[in-house]
Image (spheres, rainbow, N blue to C red):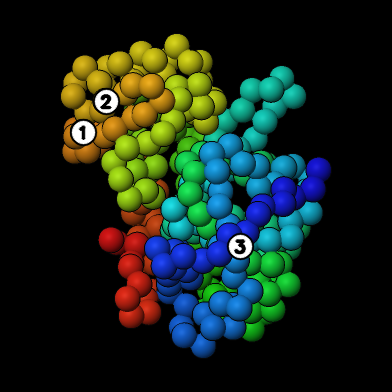
Amino acid sequence: MTERVVRTVPAASVHNPSQNHLLAALPTAEFERLAAHLELVPLPLGEILFEPGGQLQHAYFPTTAIVSLHYVMESGASSESAGVGNEGVVGISLFMGGDTTTSSAVVKSGGHAYRLPRRALMEEFGRSGLLQRLLLRYTQALITQMTQTAVCNRHHSVEQQLSRWLLSTLDRIPSGELVMTQELVASMLGVRREGITAAAGALQESGFIRYRRGHIAVLDRSGLEGRSCECYAVVKKELGRLMSDVRYRQGAVSIAD
């Protein structure tokens, strides 16, 4: 399968590459070399950016969208290994040398991203500047997320997994409400829908979330953190550690924000 073609849209004043933390961290000279090649693209819910075995031609730097990296079994069952939002980039196999991947990348929360052609990415990566160091650090953080997700799915309850997943998703969106069906959440976590129904019901009864008609609103974040396992904090702490010495261009936000 080939990489999905995504329609580009004119950049509007509400969109800015600096909404992505990796792009925001680039020095002015490095950013300007990439800026001419960056394309603002809409990423609607359910859009497939790439599928297993396809040759990647672009990297995606999400700003308001969230992309799920997951593997689909021959039986059709699937599970998310990691999520990528405004803290990262989709398409690490481009600069890691693999060119293809065994996983799929599917938009789990609609929004926008900046798309960068493979050639432009590799030219800047080959300069061995800050972009290279940022991408390699982010890759280490992504590996941590994948590893922790595997452990979490094996050893923690569905309620703990759901709490972790909601918190990590909430970190990547500007509002406290997610447009997400229980079927989609169950697919991401690799569990039965009935398990998600029970876990979401327990969290709603405790006053931590409100769920109705495909919308999940987080009402009590601290309460949700109390129900989550340690996996959420481990992943967040590692990303913060790896990016702790990063300086952002004036006007850009930091990961700590």
Task: From the top left corner, tell me how far across and down residue 123 is, in percent.
Answer: 69, 78
What is the spatial separation of the Cα atoms under label 2 and label 1, in whole angstroms? 7 Å
What is the spatial separation of the Cα atoms under label 3 and label 1, in whole angstroms? 34 Å
Q: Residue at x 28, y 61 (%)?
A: 257
Task: From the top left corner, tell me how far across and down residue 50 is, in percent.
Answer: 69, 47
* Residues under numbered marks 2 and 1 in contact, where contact means CB atoms less than 8 Å apart: yes
User: Relative to residue 239, is residue 180 depicted above or below?
Assistant: above
Q: Residue at x 30, y 45 (%)?
A: 175
- Residue type, label 2: Arg
What is the spatial separation of the Cα atoms under label 3 and label 2, in whole angstroms? 34 Å
Q: Nearer the viewer, residue 164 or 143?
A: 164
- What is the number of the mark on residue 210? 2
- Residue identifier under label 1: 219
- Residue identifier under label 3: 115
The reply, left or right, for residue 171 in relation to residue 39 is left
Task: From the top left corner, tell me how far across and down residue 25 is, in percent.
Answer: 43, 74
* Residues under numbered marks 3 and 1 in contact, where contact means CB atoms less than 8 Å apart: no
Q: Residue at x 37, y 36 (%)?
A: 178
